[in-house]
Amino acid sequence: MPYKAWVQKNIRHRNMASLDDFDDDNEQVTAELGNLGLTAAGFDYFNLDEPIELCIGKIGSHVKFKSSEIVKLLCCQVLNVPYQSLYGTLEFYRNRPLQALINRKDVTFEQLDRNVLSRTLDAIAEFGPEKLFLRCSAKVAEKLGLKVESVHLDSTSFHYSGEPRIEDGCNIVLDQGYSRDNHPELGQINELMLCDELSKLPIFETCVSGHVSDKTSFRNVITDYWDSIKAQFKDLRYLTGDSALCTSPIAKAAKEHGIKMVTRIPDKNDEATACRKMLKAHPEELVPVDENNPEGTKAMWCGEGKLGDETVKKLLVQNELLYSTKKRIITKRAEKELDKVNSQLKKLWTQPCKCKADAEQELNKITAKLKLVKLTDAGIGYEEVQKYTHKGRHGKDEQKVTVAVKVRAEVELDDTAIEQKIKEDTYYVICTNDVERNWTMAELIGVYKKQSVVERNWRCLKDKKLLINAIYLELPSRINALMWIMTTALLIYTATEYLMRKKMQEQKLTIPSPDHKVQLEKPSLMRLYQYIGNSGIVLQCNRSTGKVSVLGLPTEVKLVLIAMGDEWCRYYLKSYYQDKAF
């Protein structure tokens, strides 16, 4: 007997709740809206449906959803706070206004199954995520009136919980590599991103195999994609990146493509070493970058150097604000070195060498590698292990012979070396191949420090409020397409935040902090999402009267939406839902 029928049969004989006892008011229909309306409005405002339909649009009576509609719904889901992983898309839209979000009456959430989503991912992979993202980002930049002149390049990794996969026709391999998320034992995919320096807008993304180094992938961005990037962003001149960008092949490629480059020279590079020698010889040339702030960042010009065959201008920078951070990092590194050396010395005692010469040789190998630790004043001691040459009864005059030599040595942290290393690490050298420009110290440092715009976007993309980091798909091509979905959601997020802050500043608007003790003049979009999510915004429709209401929208959010424009208010107006099903 089915469980439901069993319950109805036995309800009169037991003290059980019946199905009728549950409140199921069919008169009132509600649907969760939350921040979906804001993301959907951003997708519409930036006209992202145009490039998506042009590139991967589907035609035919069998088509349930347009490609742009699928992308829109997935972006809304990705940016929903708190996050909902993408494998639960069908369930996610069960009680949300799916039809209203895409302005369609002939579809249901049941049709949004994995087959539909997979075909969309396949279409993205087939067309090329890089080409498609460039067209979308160009559309957004055009709408915002941005003139992209300087971009920043960086990469990150996303780990994959399944087995490493190789797919025919796809050059991406999910395998192990340098992990940025502390999962080196898992396969991963690496994503590279170019972001506009001023607006933080991502303008380009591409994915590579997990084992590919930044030096290789950065060079490939220039050689394989720069012409396409330049075609969409004609004002683009400067490319900034971390020390992985500072290689001879990349410098050569940058010159061939007319790129002005700003990067950091690796500390072990001869050019960086030469700058530190100049500092020791002429410490008086290290001067404040800002004359009005003598306690701030200091720097000194170090002339010109060579990056391969290319000439670069060098600037040595000291940032004393890094001292406490570097002290913590280097002290921890020194403690790890101390533990490692103690373990090695213990082995020389518990597993002694055959003779003193061998013991001295093994000890020298250890001491030669000491960096942040040193031998104590107790010195080094050798203890011979003596035994008879044979078993059994020993002769009266028989002597023991040395069969092994133990080493006794103690080490401790080298405070002088640690302090010197901390001081050295507060210095770094940046360079540019734009040697003809009359740079000021502040200008060159300012360009390099804006590298944080990419790092901020990575933090946003990996935020647990948005999505999970582990990828659930199997085919590398679909995972590559999924990364495109995620980065397109980030594109909408970044562009919306840029416009929101601009309009809030113009209209002098604020929203409250989470504790409502401070009014935020320049909040992150994440804070606005959080505020909207905590407000419990829902749609409510009375079946008898047909009256639709939007409940829970705070006044501060209403004012922000009005300032951003009518298009941003659409999904929060009851008039929009009067003739739409949800």
Image (cartoon, grey):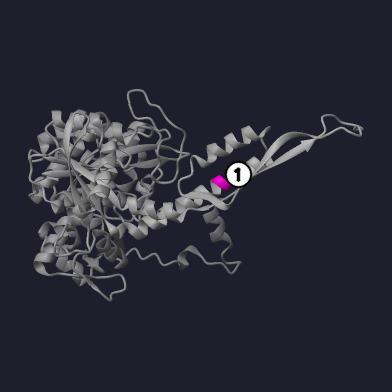
Q: In the rendering, at what x and y percent does residue 49 appear? A: 16, 43
Q: Residues within 10 Å of mark 1 (few under 14, many from 20)?
A: many
Residue 567, picture quadrant: bottom left
Start-end of magenta stretch: 341-345
The amino acid on which the numbered mark 1 sits, given as a three-letter code, is Leu
Q: Is residue 61 visible?
A: no
Magenta stretch containing residue 343, yes or no? yes
Nearest the viewer among 461 and 391 is 391
- The residue at which mark 1 appears reads as 345
Q: Is residue 179 left or right of residue 504?
A: right
Would you say residue 276 sits in the magenta stretch?
Answer: no
Is 28 left, or right, of 468 in this rendering?
Answer: left
Residue lying at 55% horizontally and 54% vertically, measured from the top left: 3
Provide residue 139's location: percent of width, then percent of height. Answer: 12, 43
Q: Position of residue 308 (x, y in %)?
A: 22, 30
Q: Is residue 86 left or right of residue 41?
A: right
In the image, farthest residue toward the front: 397
Which residue appears at 42% of the width and 30% of the height? 165
Give the quadrant of the C terminus: bottom left
Q: Nearer the viewer, residue 184 or 386?
A: 386
Question: Is residue 346 shown above or below 4?
Answer: above
Q: Where is residue 412 drawn, in percent x and y?
A: 53, 53
Q: Is residue 512 visible?
A: yes
Q: Main secondary structure of the magenta part?
A: helix
